[in-house]
Amino acid sequence: MVMIHNVSVAADGDYRDMDAASEMLKQANDSVAAAYQLKTGKSRAEILRAMDSETWMSSAEAVRFGIVDGIAGSMRDQPQLAAANSPLMPKAMIEKARTLIPKGYNVSNPAEKPDFYMREKAQQQLNILKMEELNK
């Protein structure tokens, strides 16, 4: 099964923080929709409708929609990824993630936390690194 949906995030703070989180979500949603549009060749309106509806597709439907290139063979024949059954990440990915820590941020002092949006940006970059690692 494949599911496409709008970008979501957990946020806290006052109305200004919520407005900023909403704007960040809209921008992220537009970026994801643009990527889906490039991949599928479908119209932006059709992609946004599918995302708004939290659309679930079978593997065959996902191929027809254009979101996947094909259907893999039996999952029993697929190699198991290290992170698939443990919280550990490959060392190279950990090192890449360390490059996302803002300069001057003291990792040994948890009281010094980057602001909310810096954490969100770092999480998005880490997710991209994970996707790149899976596509190798």
Image (spheres, helix red, strand yellow):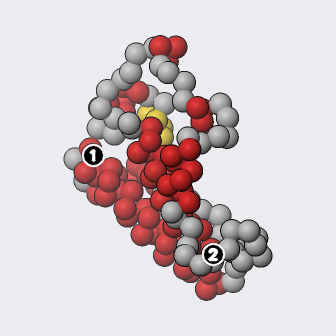
Residue 42 in sight: no
Taking depth in this image into account, of 99 and 122 the one nearest to the observer is 99
Under tag 2, what secondary structure? Answer: loop
* Residue contact between numbered discs 1 and 2, judged by CB atoms under 8 Å: no
Image height of 77 relative to 82, above or below: above
Cα–Cα span, label 1 and label 2: 37 Å
Q: Which residue is mark 2?
A: 105
Residue type highlighted by circle 1: Lys
**Quadrant of image for the C terminus:** top left
Residue 6 numbered tag:
none
- x then y, percent, for residue 38: 25, 51
Of tags 1 and 2, the one toward the viewer is 2
- x then y, percent, for residue 26: 45, 69
Q: Which residue is mark 1?
A: 39
56 to the left or right of 88:
left
Q: Residues within 10 Å of mark 2 (few under 14, many from 20)?
A: few
Of labels 1 and 2, earlier in sequence is 1
Name the residue furthest bottom: 16
Under tag 1, what secondary structure? Answer: helix
Taking depth in this image into account, of 129 and 35 the one nearest to the observer is 129
Q: Tell me which corner region of the image, top left, top right, bottom left or bottom right, holds residue 33.
A: bottom left
Image height of 8 relative to 90, above or below: below
- x then y, percent, for residue 119: 59, 68
